[in-house]
């Protein structure tokens, strides 16, 4: 079952205190990005946060579940936290800060340089 746009809009509204959060549709579900880093997934109208030590420390009690079949477990965010705008935003910022910047693939880097050679 694909996630509903209204749920995605709700999550984005809850995270409106964070800078630069966007949702990108992927296979009927959504990936959430902050400053270019994918930090969460919305699958079947549930929010999953990428696991990090910093996120675990904030959550204290963690429920882990795979966001889609054959996926590694992510942190499944419960309804209580979804309703707490400040705590959810803090978790999102903390998680994104703990993640590395994505690596630029060589083809994209070459295109930015204006050449196709590595």
Image (spheres, grey):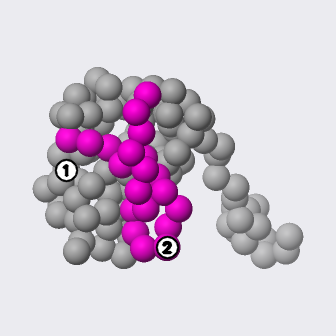
Crowding near pointer 1: few (<14 within 10 Å), some, many (20+)?
few
Q: Position of residue 37 (x, y in %)?
A: 53, 47
SS class, disc 2: loop
Residue drawn at x 43%, y 28% as measured from the top left: 60
As displayed, is residue 115 above or below residue 19?
A: below
**Within-10-Å neighbours for mark 2: few <14, some 14–19, many 20+:** few
Residue receiving disc 2: 70
The reply, left or right, for residue 8 in relation to residue 27 is: left
Query: Image point 51% across, 27% down: which residue?
Result: 57
The answer to whether 1 is drawn above or below residue 45 in the figure is below
Q: Quadrant of the N terminus?
A: bottom left
Mark 2–mark 1 distance (CA, rounded to whole Å): 27 Å
Which residue is at 22% across, 28% downward? Answer: 84
Q: Which residue is mark 1?
A: 9
Q: Nearer the viewer, residue 66 or 3?
A: 66
The dominant secondary structure in magenta is loop
User: Range of the magenta residues?
Assistant: 60-79
Q: Is residue 118 magenta?
A: no
Q: Left or right: 52 with respect to 66?
A: right
Residue 28 position in % (x across, y down): 30, 73
Quarter holding residue 101? top right
Residue situated in front as seen by the camera: 106 or 65:
65
Q: Which mark's residue is nearer the viewer, 2 or 1?
A: 2
Residue found 49% across the figure and 33% down from its top: 55
For residue 104, which quarter of the picture?
bottom right
Is residue 89 shown left or right of residue 6? right
């Amino acid at each position: 079952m694909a996630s509903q746009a209204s749920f995605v809009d709700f999550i984005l509204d809850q995270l409106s205190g964070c800078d630069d959060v966007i949702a990108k549709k992927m296979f009927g579900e959504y990936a959430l990005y902050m400053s270019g880093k994918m930090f969460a997934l919305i699958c079947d109208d549930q929010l999953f946060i990428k696991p990090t030590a910093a996120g675990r420390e904030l959550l204290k009690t963690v429920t882990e579940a795979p966001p889609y079949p054959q996926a590694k477990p992510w942190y499944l965010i419960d309804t209580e936290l979804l309703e707490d705008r400040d705590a959810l935003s803090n978790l999102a910022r903390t998680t994104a800060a703990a993640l590395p910047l994505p690596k630029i693939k060589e083809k994209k880097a070459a295109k930015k340089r204006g050449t196709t050679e590595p």
